[in-house]
């Protein structure tokens, strides 16, 4: 008695291994793409934050420079200050003081609402100030007293750069100009000056640090510097300070989300295909073989027992039946071999449909176009790709109208043109009403793809020609030409000998062999497939019967 069929057939293990390798490749490629996408998005976000910060600092510089010009202009050319210095009458001096106060108030309300101004004449111990409402009166008064004390004690060195002082935990930027006994100064709190920078360039998680010329930290605003991904130091223009900015900018994850969706779609498509392959292999290959072997083992056991116990006449009848059974087994084996050949051809057809490198290249192109924000090209490419993929997974043993195959040839060429950024022309000549005849799917596309891959000419110089006509014998003739290098002598010998092509064990030319097998299963001997060279290029002619109604191989469930 023969041993039962082992579970886990080698062919099934090879298929599972191939699927696992493909899934692992897609997973690794997907992780790398996600990491790159995240890094690129973070870099773009950091560059955007840096650009906004520089714009805001330029605005700060312009405000400080304008205030410097105003202080110098007021000190040197103000008639009120000259009169205050020249007059002796206290009443008239007070009148000029009030006039100067009005002038300071007008200028502050006109262009410098955030600044506070203070004038002081040391000789007459008189002056006036106009305070900003951005900080409290008490805080402005503290700043005024500090400046007045400095005027009386040491004065300030001449400099166009604003100084900084920390009063009551609040940093102030100030500038002072003196001429004789007259002093004029302006100040603003750092929080007020940098408020637009904080609101515009930074998120609620960001902040900044003020560093003086001695590299000592004067002040730190809100935010958590330890968790910040963006850190950069800038010179606070027009001052003696440096500004250390830290933040965790929001990252635009649109590209990453799109990429995750594409990878997830690919993964589930592959999973569904794996499940379908396993079920198909078990139902149509493994289970029939198991039942066939069980029947043989059962009959062999019965035959041995009958021979031992039966009569001579009965044994002769059994021998005659054995002869008939052997003939039946031979026919049955031929049938199973045909079924296995059909299943193998289907499997090769499905392997052609997968084309992992083609899909991975398409994802790379989509990602590149997404980075370049080529929205219209992405939409056009996705539409063409979806049509082509839907056609790829059509039933390889059901005939389709020739015009459908030709439209998919054009879709395939459009995809190749986008991938390679070229225009591959297709010269089509088709007899009238030929588009209604039925052909197997991927019949023409396979040869067009081979021309693009193996023509060995510049893609911009490649030309394809397609002629479709009806012969005198009533056959449908399909002629595919290119202007490439043509076939080698070995290839012509292999392709034009159908038996050699079927028996090739080196897995060469899987696409051509698959087409030849499918044509053989669909039409028997009523087809021809001819390969030849012409000057220049290669030429393939396919001749099949003209059918306008569906025919096909019976596929048992």
Image: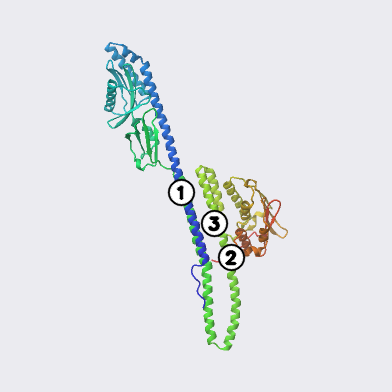
> What percent of the width, then of the height, locates residue 103?
34, 19
* Residue with the mark numbered 2: 342
What element does badge 1 sit on? helix
- Give the residue at x 52% y 62%: 15
Which circle, 2 or 3, is nearer the viewer? 3
- The first of marks 3 and 1 along the sequence is 1
- Figure label count: 3
- The first of marks 2 and 3 along the sequence is 2
- The first of marks 1 and 2 along the sequence is 1
* Residue with the mark numbered 1: 34
What element does badge 2 sit on? helix
**Residue 354 disc label:** 3
- Give the residue at x 40% y 25%: 65
Between residue 15 and residue 259, name the one nearer to us.
Answer: 15
User: Badge 2: few (under 14), some or many (20 or more) residues near its Cα, within 10 Å?
Assistant: some
User: Badge 3: few (under 14), some or many (20 or more) residues near its Cα, within 10 Å?
Assistant: some
Mark pair 3, 1: CA separation: 23 Å
Can residue 550 be seen at all in this image of the molecule?
Answer: no
Q: How is the image coloured?
A: rainbow
> What percent of the width, then of the height, locates residue 383?
54, 49
User: Badge 1: few (under 14), some or many (20 or more) residues near its Cα, within 10 Å?
Assistant: some
Which circle, 1 or 2, is nearer the viewer? 1
Label 1–label 2 contact, CB within 8 A:
no
> What percent of the width, then of the height, locates residue 554?
58, 65
């Amino acid at each position: 008695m023969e041993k039962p069929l082992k579970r886990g057939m080698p062919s099934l293990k090879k298929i599972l291994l191939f699927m696992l390798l493909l899934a692992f490749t897609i997973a690794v490629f997907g992780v790398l793409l996600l990491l790159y996408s995240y890094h690129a998005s973070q870099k773009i976000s950091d560059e955007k934050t840096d650009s906004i910060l520089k714009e805001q600092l330029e605005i700060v510089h312009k405000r400080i420079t304008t205030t410097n010009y105003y202080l110098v202009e007021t000190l040197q050319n103000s008639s009120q200050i000259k009169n205050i210095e020249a007059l002796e009458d206290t009443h008239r001096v007070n009148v000029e003081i009030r006039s100067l106060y009005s002038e300071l108030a007008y200028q502050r309300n006109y262009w410098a609402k955030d600044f506070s101004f203070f004038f002081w004449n040391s000789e007459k111990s008189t002056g006036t100030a106009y305070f900003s409402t951005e900080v409290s009166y008490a805080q402005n008064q503290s700043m005024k007293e500090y400046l007045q004390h400095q005027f009386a004690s040491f004065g300030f060195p001449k400099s166009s750069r604003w100084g900084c002082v920390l009063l009551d935990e609040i940093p102030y930027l100030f500038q002072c100009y003196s001429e004789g006994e007259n002093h004029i100064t302006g100040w603003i709190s750092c929080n007020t000056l940098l408020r637009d920078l904080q609101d515009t360039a930074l998120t609620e998680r960001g902040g900044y640090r003020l560093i003086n010329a001695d590299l000592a930290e004067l002040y730190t605003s809100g935010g958590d510097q330890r968790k910040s991904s963006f850190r950069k130091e800038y010179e606070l223009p027009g001052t003696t300070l440096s500004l250390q900015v830290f933040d965790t900018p929001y990252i635009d994850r649109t590209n990453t989300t799109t990429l995750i969706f594409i990878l997830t779609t690919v993964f589930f498509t592959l999973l569904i295909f794996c499940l379908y392959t396993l079920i198909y292999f078990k139902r149509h290959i493994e289970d029939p073989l198991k039942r066939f072997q069980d029947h043989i083992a059962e009959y062999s056991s019965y035959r041995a027992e009958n021979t031992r116990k039966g009569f001579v006449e009965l044994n002769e009848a059994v021998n005659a039946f054995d002869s008939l059974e052997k003939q039946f087994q031979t026919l049955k084996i031929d049938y199973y071999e045909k079924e296995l050949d059909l299943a193998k051809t289907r499997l090769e057809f499905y392997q052609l449909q997968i084309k992992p490198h083609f899909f991975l290249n398409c994802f790379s192109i989509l990602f590149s176009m997404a980075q370049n924000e080529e929205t219209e090209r992405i939409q056009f490419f996705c539409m063409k790709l979806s049509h082509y993929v839907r056609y790829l997974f059509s039933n390889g043993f059901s005939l389709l109208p020739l015009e459908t195959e030709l439209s998919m040839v054009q879709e395939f060429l459009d995809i190749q043109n986008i991938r390679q950024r070229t225009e591959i022309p297709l010269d089509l000549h088709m007899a009238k009403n030929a588009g209604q005849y039925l052909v197997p799917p991927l019949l023409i596309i396979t040869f067009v793809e081979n021309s693009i891959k193996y023509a060995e000419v510049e893609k911009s110089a490649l030309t394809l020609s397609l002629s479709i006509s009806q012969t005198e014998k009533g056959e449908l003739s399909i002629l595919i030409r290119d202007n490439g290098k043509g076939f080698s002598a070995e290839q012509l010998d292999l392709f034009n000998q159908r038996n050699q092509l079927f028996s090739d064990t080196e897995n060469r030319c899987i696409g051509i062999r698959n087409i030849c097998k499918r044509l053989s299963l669909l039409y028997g001997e009523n087809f021809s497939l001819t390969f030849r060279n012409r000057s220049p290029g290669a030429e393939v002619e396919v001749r099949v019967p003209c059918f306008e109604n569906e025919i096909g191989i019976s596929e048992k469930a």
